[in-house]
């Protein structure tokens, strides 16, 4: 199944990756946030940990990029979302026990980025509002079924089918 019931170990998986990254990043102005569906307790999700590595000083990005490249990531651009830089793991002969065993997406964002603020607002709202969490979960299962459990089709349909729901949650979060 593309979407899995919430797994308690997702929090521990995030913590392991976070601690590992903190050990390699040589700037003092970062915070690392667990985002996406795996960060919301009781929310079904694709079993991939989404991570936002957030920095405060614009000049820090150069050091963060170098540090990530040194441990086997490569910069994959912003993939169409301004201010959210995507880093992916390279396949290397030498595997990292944690970074290569826990499936994750890594995004590097400047703290003042509007898209980051929206991302965190959506996550926080779902964490605090069971009704919204359940509605989003049902929507995700519906999209997975329509996509015939195909990952690429799921992503395409989710972009279209979940947009209004996500926007309504972000608007609601700003009103609270």
Image: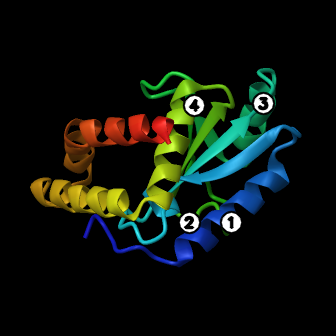
Separation of disc 3 and disc 2 at Cα? 27 Å
* Disc 4 and disc 2 in contact, CB within 8 angstroms: no
Which labelled disc corresponds to residue 76? none
Read off the residue under disc 2. 102
- State the residue in front, 133 or 7: 133
Q: Residues within 10 Å of mark 2 (few under 14, many from 20)?
A: some
Q: Which residue is mark 4?
A: 85
- Closest to the camera, between mark 3 and mark 2, is 3
> Disc 4 or 1, which lies upstream in sequence?
1
Residue annotated with mark 1: 15
Point out the tag, 4 or 2, that comes first from the N-terminus. 4
Q: Is residue 55 above or below residue 4?
A: above
Q: Residue at x 38, y 43 (%)?
A: 169
Mark 3, residue position: 56
Q: Element under label 2? A: loop
Could you say which quadrant of the image residue 158 lies in?
top left
In the image, residue 135 lies at what x, y percent?
Answer: 27, 58
- Residue depth check, mark 1 versus mark 3: number of the one nearer the observer: 3
Q: Quadrant of residue 159?
A: top left
- Give the percent coordinates (x, y) of residue 150: 20, 55
Where residue 151 appears, x then y in whole percent?
A: 26, 53
Q: Going from the N terminus, do you reach mark 3 or mark 2 first? A: 3
| Residue drawn where x is 67% and y is 61% of the image | 17
Give the Cα separation between the discs numbered 4 and 2: 20 Å
Marks 1/2: CA–CA distance: 11 Å
* Circle 4 Cα neighbour tier, 10 Å, few/some/many (<14 / 14–19 / ≥20): many
Q: In the rendered view, would you say 61 is above or below 129?
A: above
Q: CA distance from mark 4 to mark 3?
A: 14 Å
């Amino acid at each position: 199944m593309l979407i899995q019931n919430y797994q308690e170990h997702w929090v521990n998986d995030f913590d392991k990756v976070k601690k590992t990254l903190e050990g390699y990043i040589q700037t003092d102005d970062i915070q690392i946030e667990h985002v996406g569906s795996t960060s919301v307790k009781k929310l079904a999700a694709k079993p991939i940990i989404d991570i936002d590595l957030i920095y405060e000083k614009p000049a820090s990005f150069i050091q963060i990029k170098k540090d990530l490249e040194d441990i086997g990531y490569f910069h994959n651009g912003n993939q169409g979302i301004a201010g959210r830089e995507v880093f992916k793991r390279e396949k290397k002969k030498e595997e990292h026990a944690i970074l290569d065993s826990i499936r994750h997406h890594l995004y590097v964002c400047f703290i003042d980025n509007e898209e980051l603020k929206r991302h965190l607002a959506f996550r926080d709202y779902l964490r605090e509002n069971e009704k919204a969490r359940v509605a989003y979960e049902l929507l995700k299962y519906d999209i997975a079924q329509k996509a015939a459990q195909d990952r690429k089709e799921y992503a395409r349909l989710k972009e279209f089918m979940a947009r209004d729901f996500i926007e309504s949650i972000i608007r609601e979060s700003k009103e609270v």
